[in-house]
Image (cartoon, rainbow, N blue to C red):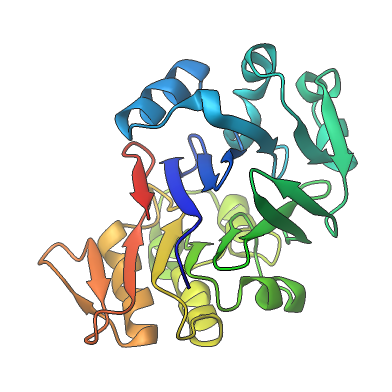
Amino acid sequence: MYPQIHLHVLASGSKGNATLVEGPDGFVLVDCGISHKALRERAEELGLDLGRLRAVLVTHEHGDHTKGLPVLSRRFSGPMYATAGTVGARKDLVGLPFTLVDHSCELDLAGMRVRCFPTSHDVADPMCFRFETDDDAVGYCTDSGVLTDEAMALLFGVRVLAIESNHDPRMLASGPYPAYLKERVASERGHLSNEQAAEALRDLVDEDTETVVAMHLSQENNRPSVCVRALAAAVGAEAVNDAWSEARTPDGLLSICAAGQDWPITVW
């Protein structure tokens, strides 16, 4: 694939999420769970001009994905998209100028075709996305306890795959969370584990896939090195450093890395 879409993860984790997907005609922001100040600062750190923001997509209503939207909506005049279930689930979202969509919609945004699909999370009506042009594709999926057949179909064969790899099951089981929260995270309406993400990679990665970005890592129940090691094993990748912060297949064609809560990254 010829790179036409670029992924800029400004924040990913339980304390706040925001990702800019850059198409030929500007940026689409997926979620805004950080402050407007942090959004601007992290974009600037990556050399990105938020004046090129063309649209906002919201995956679901949890605060770590939406708490920055009220302020953003006062500073951004472009379209903001969410499902009716997402908007209706929070009082601070109801009055915002959303365009309502369902999780089977297709949108033309920033020079990209955006295909929505449902996810499995303990919220009203969540969704995630495939971004594509004629020559490129990026898949984005977080906050889902399982990957449905529809999700697998739309995430298959993208050049850049941003996929949730939230927790290590052993760390979750022995960690500080109360029992009800452990059960929630591990459920089919919770979050994908490292092992679930790794298993999915065996079916999702093909010759067009160049980068896998592990998303929404738990700070309590995961580590980047643990996550990258698990995903690497699924596709025959090897560590590129002792810290296991990145892995690459022996042919150099596929890289694996982890997005973080506090350090923005760009995948070209």
Left or right side of 244 for 26? right
Query: What percent of the width, then of the height, locates residue 234?
Result: 39, 85
| Displayed quadrant of residue 183 | bottom right
Query: What percent of the width, then of the height, locates residue 197?
Result: 50, 73
Q: Is residue 121 visible?
A: no
The quarter in which the C terminus is drawn is bottom left
Q: Residue at x 44, y 44 (%)?
A: 9
Q: How many marks?
A: 0
Give 233 or 41, whichever is nearer the viewer.
41
Query: What percent of the width, then of the height, locates residue 147?
Result: 67, 72
Q: Residue at x 54, y 66 (%)?
A: 136
Q: Residue at x 51, y 55 (%)?
A: 5
Q: Is residue 267 visible?
A: yes
Query: What percent of the width, then of the height, locates residue 68?
Result: 59, 23
Q: Tell me if residue 191 comes above or below residue 249 in the rendering.
A: above
Left or right side of 219 for 52? right
Left or right side of 213 for 125? right
Q: Residue at x 39, y 40 (%)?
A: 261
Give 221 or 263, whichever is nearer the viewer.
263
Give 89 or 41, whichever is nearer the viewer.
41
| Displayed quadrant of residue 69 | top right
Q: Tell me if residue 128 comes above or below residue 33 in the rendering.
A: below
Q: Tell me if residue 251 comes above or below residue 256 in the rendering.
A: below
